[in-house]
Image: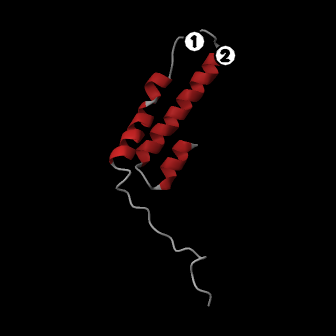
Amino acid sequence: MIGYLAYTSGFMAKIFGVLLMVAGLGYLADAFAAILVPDFPFSFALFVSGGEVALSFWLIIRGRQVRVPTIPSPMLSTPR
């Protein structure tokens, strides 16, 4: 869900949305593997967490510089 929102927002690069979607699927696979096979030796989380790390660095370095466009509020406009 967060990956889809990041992908469609236009606020950041679409690659972060894709990486977060892959991370979500990896965490989901880990959860199902833990339920279905109690001694599952492999963890997808080790490999899919790169998207979250990349997003964190992007937010630290570039996120503060991004300008959000202002949308005029209908509550502030004068009646006609």
Residue 17 locus on image (x, y percent): 47, 44
Between the residue at mark 2 and the residue at mark 1, the CA separation in whole angstroms equals 9 Å
Q: Residue furthest right?
A: 36
Q: Foreground: 4 or 80?
A: 80
Residue at mark 1: 40
Residue at (58% x, 25% y) in the render: 29
**Colouring chosen for the image of the structure:** secondary structure
Residue at (41% x, 40% y) in the render: 56
Residue at mark 2: 36
The reply, left or right, for residue 73 in relation to residue 48 is right
Residue 10 locus on image (x, y percent): 45, 56
Residue at (45% x, 38% y) in the render: 19
Quadrant where the image shows the C terminus: bottom right
Q: Residue furthest bottom?
A: 80
Mark 1 element type: loop
Identify which amino acid the numbered label 1 is placed on: Phe
- Mark 2 and mark 1 in contact? Answer it, CB < 8 Å: yes
Identify which amino acid the numbered label 2 is placed on: Leu
Location of residue 33 with respect to 17 vertically, above or below: above
Q: Foreground: 60 or 29?
A: 60
Quadrant where the image shows the N terminus: top right
Q: Quadrant of residue 24?
A: top right
Graded by Cα atoms within 10 Å as few (under 14), some (14 to 19) or many (20 or more), the crowding at tag 2 reads few
